[in-house]
Each structure stands twice: as C-alpha cells, then as structure tokens.
Image (cartoon, helix red, strand yellow):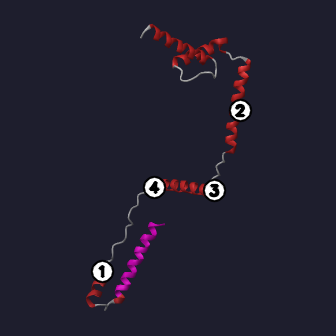
C-alpha cells in the first residue's frame, strides 16, 4: 500500500470514530476497532458517569420499555388450572404404585405344606372290594371314607387355626 492509500484509510477510520462518538450519528458500517475505541472514550469521559440529562433520557427509555413488557404480560392469557379429576387420577395412580411396591416387597413367611393323614388300610380294602364287585359293598366304603374325611378336616382345621 502506498502512503496516500494508508492516509485515506486512516482518515476514513478517524471520521468513522468521530461519528461513532456522536450517539446516533454513525453512518454505514463502522470498523469494529472504531466502535470499541468510541465506547472506551465515551465511558472514560467524566469518570464513567452519565451526564444528568443523559441519565434522565436513559431512565425514561428503560421505564417505557418496562411498561411495554408489563403490558404484554398483562394481555397474555393465564393458564387454566388443572381439573380436579386430573389431581385425583394422579394421586390414585401414585397410591396404587406405592401399594404395589409394598405388596411385592413385604416379607412373607415360608408356606409349608399341611401334613394330611394317610388313608386307613380299611379304606383302601373297601375301595378295592367296591371296584371289584362294582358297588356291592357301598356302605362299608362310605363308612371308611367318612372316618378318613373327618381326620383330613381335623388336620386342615389345626393348620388354619
């Protein structure tokens, strides 16, 4: 680059910086370093404090924006509350799940089989004779079976008392 081109580039950047320092008067695209320099110079002027009139203008802008946002929020529809049956369904489901977990996790006593009495030899012989003669000795078989039933019922009654 020649001296003239460098000088023109520096003048353009200086002019952009001057416009950037004047709020709202920047034209076109400004170089990033010019904007950073303008922001630094603007902040350093006066120890970083805003002038009273500028402070009032910024405060007015902020309050106006806040009122617009609050107005939008007030116009927004409020969500409807959930119907009562959804709450009931949710609590019912939770209670069912808890009950199922407790039921499955509850310790159980080991179940032992009930000792039933062995059939009497008289019952077995009466049954065999009844089969051989096809119902000829029904009374003896019923009497032997009745005694056996009584002993089985007694054993089951003792188990579940």
Disc 1 or 2, which lies upstream in sequence? 2
- Between the residue at mark 3 and the residue at mark 4, the CA separation in whole angstroms equals 32 Å
Q: Where is mark 2, residue-wise?
A: 64
Give the numbered dot on residue 83.
3
**Mark 4, residues whose alpha carbon is within 10 Å: few (<14), some, or many (≥20)?**
few
Q: Which of 55 and 134 is in front in this view?
A: 55
Disc 3 or 1, which lies upstream in sequence? 3
- Indicate whether residue 86 is drawn in magenta: no
Q: What element carries label 3?
A: loop
Q: What element carries label 4?
A: helix
* Residue 118 drawn at (x, y percent): 33, 73
Disc 4 or 1, which lies upstream in sequence? 4
Q: Nearer the viewer, mark 1 or mark 2?
A: 2
Disc 3 or 2, which lies upstream in sequence? 2
Furthest-left residue in this view: 132
In terms of secondary structure, what is the magenta stretch mainly?
A: helix
Give the numbered dot on residue 138.
none
- Between the residue at mark 3 and the residue at mark 1, the CA separation in whole angstroms equals 70 Å
Q: Where is mark 1, residue-wise?
A: 124
Instruction: Give the quadrant of residue 92.
Output: bottom right
Looking at the image, which residue is at 50% across and 12% down?
8
Looking at the image, which residue is at 66% across and 45% down?
76
């Amino acid at each position: 680059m020649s001296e003239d081109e460098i000088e023109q580039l520096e003048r353009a950047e200086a002019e952009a910086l001057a416009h950037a320092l004047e709020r709202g008067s920047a034209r076109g695209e400004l170089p990033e370093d010019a904007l950073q320099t303008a922001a630094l110079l603007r902040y350093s002027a006066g120890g970083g404090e805003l002038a009273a009139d500028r402070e009032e203008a910024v405060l007015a802008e902020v309050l106006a924006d806040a009122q617009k946002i609050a107005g939008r929020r007030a116009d927004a529809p409020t969500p409807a509350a959930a119907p009562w049956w959804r709450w009931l369904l949710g609590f019912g489901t939770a209670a069912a799940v808890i009950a199922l977990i407790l039921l499955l996790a509850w310790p159980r006593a080991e179940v032992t089989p009930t000792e039933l009495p062995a059939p009497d030899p008289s019952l077995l012989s009466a049954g065999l004779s009844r089969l051989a003669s096809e119902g000829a000795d029904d009374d003896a078989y019923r009497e032997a079976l009745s005694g056996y039933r009584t002993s089985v019922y007694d054993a089951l009654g003792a188990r579940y008392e």
